[in-house]
Amino acid sequence: MNSTLVRGYLAPANDFQPNCRSRAVFPEENRVLGLRVGSSFDESQFESVESQNEGSYSSSPEGEISKEMDHSDAILKYIGIMLMEEEDLENKPCMLHDCLALQATEKSLYDVLNNNDSSNQTDSTASGSSSDITSFLESNWAENIRDFESSLSPSEIHYQNLAPRDKKHRYREDNSGDYRSNKQLANNVGGEPEELDMYDKVLLCSNSDNALVSDCETKTKWQPKGATRGRPKGGKKQQGVIKEVVDLRTLLMQCAQAVATFDSRTINDLLAKIRQHSSPRGDGTERLAHYFANALQARVAGTGSAALFHRISAAVMLRGYQTYIKACPFKKMSNLLANKTIRKLADSATTLHIIDFGILYGFQWPCLIQALSERRGGPPKLRITGIDFPQPGFRPAERVADTGDRLARYCERFGVPFEYTAIAQKWESIKVEELKIERDELLVVNCLYRLQNVPDETVVANSPRDQVLKLIKRINPDMFIQGAVNGTYNTPFFVTRFREALFQYSSMFDMYEATVPREDPNRLLFEEEVFGKDITNIIACEGTERLNWPETYKQWQARTVRAGFRQLPLDQQIVRCVRSKVKEEYHKDFSVDEDGKWMLQGWKGRVLHAFSCWKPAHN
């Protein structure tokens, strides 16, 4: 095991000094022209299309929004250039997985040292070792099976040919949806001037077409639709061919129930049968079954936490994300909606301060920086406070600070006055004073899909998640932008959590099956390194060893209201454009809907991501 990694894990985050680092850039050109932030934010500008403030927009707002949508595709090219130019990415661990692993390991070590292993306690409760839990599982088992059978479509009943054969024949529906990109994880940009020229061309907002997308579409070869049934014309009757109907999801549920009741013989029999009919290279359901079987086996063997010590390189993650962001619009559309909302809000601001919880590599912001530079009257001063969890080792804030250096270079090139503060510590321990908030600045808090990494009250009695929301309330921002993964697999009861996770990841694997060729190596990589490890963590780990605690968007709404926020209406013009782009450029089964003041994104009717805007209720 890497000694540096071990040293990093053994240094608890509570012992870290607040790791802050500031960077300021004040270019001589394009100074701000004495504009003032209004005394209050007019909420009505988000309530109707007629009240849109055109500001520096063109005469065709829809065209302007569409233009920025195309600009965001440059992130995909940028990732490709990083993979080609930065050889050390192969040796650098993924920033997200590294910090989450450190956080989980610190908590596990704390539990052991204090003789209070909450993981064992939770596992005992969840696995149903008591007679009450066993009776509960037995009474609900028939209903669970009926739920799964009713949710199955004919395409999810798999026929396995038990006779020897050389090759499995797979079939899939043809898909004409375009691959598009999204801002995602990437590592540090090289500092050489000649390299930056190339990075500018691919990272920043331009009107050029997405070459990588076109190349992917050209190389994509879809398999024929449908399967030949019955005996081929002119052929002889086949001998020794036996067809068996296999319902893999029901087998998985039966195996989960056996795991919950410690029925080792049934576990072994069911796992053997599942593995016989599953494969990481099969269709979507076979791949789903393969990784859930791995997770069940890891839970039985007690090796689920071992995945915490497996460091995924940044290059591996970037290659996998390249495929993910071509196939899926979720994060790209969220970034678009967030950036356009911020840009509109800052139309008359002299200073814009963005506090980004979970900044990672900061790829949400380059296109916003360019948009601000084009503002009529000159750009505002941009202050970004980048917050993330500490990294293992002796420089826990290093990569968060690197993100600021990268953003500072782009602000300098586009004449946007810039100041950056890096903070790497537990989010609930941050003090308002560390954020260096100034008077008369427009203040926006941004957190897209990262609050699920903060434990809730099911893990820690004094919920860190609620503490973070209360911290944001004390910050008193003009707007709080929230993105949430809509998940229902955050229950301490194992069988219930297993069932909900199976539903959630069925949608994810089905999405990949419909949009990415099966033989795509980056699809295989992403499914193994991201989906597979996340599934193992959800199924095989308990308590503080878990990395994600998702909630439904309605639960997030109740939690955020309790923290003292009120929800703001979404900009309907931007929402309409998002809906139109998804319909035109992505697979037909992706959806964009609204529920109240939430924008919901999903696949085949299942809501997977949600987006909303808030502000403190007393404002």
Image (spheres, grey):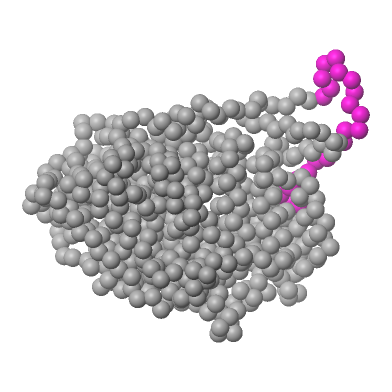
Q: Quadrant of the N terminus?
A: bottom right
List x then y, in percent, for residue 615: 30, 60
The majority secondary structure of the magenta stretch comes to loop
Residue that appears at 37% across and 47% down: 335
Furthest residue to the right? 239
List x then y, in percent, for residue 588: 51, 33
In front: 436, or 11? 11
Furthest residue to the left? 34
The reply, left or right, for residue 8 in relation to residue 55 is right
In front: 190, or 425? 190
The reply, left or right, for residue 238 in relation to residue 592 is right
Residue 539 falls in image quadrant: bottom right
On the question of residue 148 being in view, the answer is no
Residue 227 lies in the magenta stretch: no
Which residues, given as a range, are shown in magenta? 230-251
The reply, left or right, for residue 420 in relation to residue 387 is left
List x then y, in percent, for residue 348: 15, 49
Furthest residue to the top? 234
**Is 62 situated above or below 309?**
above
In front: 45, or 267? 267
Q: Quadrant of the C terminus?
A: bottom left
Residue that appears at 76% across and 67% down: 261
Residue that appears at 43% across and 61% down: 451
On the question of residue 502 being in view, the answer is yes
Residue 246 lies in the magenta stretch: yes
Residue 582 falls in image quadrant: top left
The reply, left or right, for residue 581 in relation to residue 238 is left
Residue that appears at 51% across and 49% down: 316
